[in-house]
Image: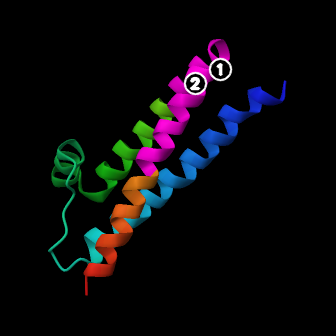
Amino acid sequence: MRAKILPILGLLLFVELSLADLLMTWVLLHHGGGRVYESNPIAGVFHARYGFTGLAALKLTTLAYVGGVSLHVSRRYLVIGLFLVLFACLAAGSTVAYSWRILDMVP
């Protein structure tokens, strides 16, 4: 029974990392002096067309989709669901780490 809580804990970590990514993106875009841009092509289109609100909507929609899929899969295939959550956390965490590195370079 305890193992079934792991996907939920992983999802909470993914939510935190995704929100950190959104915050780092905002900081870099607004305080980067025009030298920083959204390098994800899909997110870049949303940012260009709808501003930061569109970018935030895309990131939150992605968060909800990945979280929902991970929880759904975890109900039937616990190990696969855990791997999905782990991969999502690694992807979001590496993005936050990369953004942090870029933040050190921006004056």
Residue drawn where x is 37% and y is 55% of the image: 95
Residue 81 is situated, as x and y percent measured from the top left of the image, at 58, 24
Residue drawn where x is 62% and y is 14% of the image: 77
Of the 4 image quadrants, the one containing the C terminus is: bottom left
Considering every residue shown, the one lying at the far top of the view is 76
Query: Mark 2 near mark 1, Cβ–Cβ under 8 Å?
Result: yes
Q: Main secondary structure of the magenta part?
A: helix
Q: Is residue 37 left or right of residue 66?
A: left
Residue drawn where x is 54% and y is 45% of the image: 14
Q: Is residue 89 left or right of residue 37?
A: right
Of the 4 image quadrants, the one containing the N terminus is: top right
Q: Determine which of the numbered discs, if any, sits on residue 78 in the image.
A: 1
What residue type is disc 2 on?
Answer: Gly
Q: Is residue 91 magenta?
A: yes
Q: Determine which of the numbered discs, if any, sits on residue 81 in the image.
A: 2
Q: Which residues are magenta?
A: 68-92
Residue 75 is situated, as x and y percent measured from the top left of the image, at 66, 17
Residue 86 is situated, as x and y percent measured from the top left of the image, at 53, 38
Residue 61: quadrant of the picture: top left
Decide: is 80 above or below 64: above
What residue type is disc 1 on?
Answer: Leu
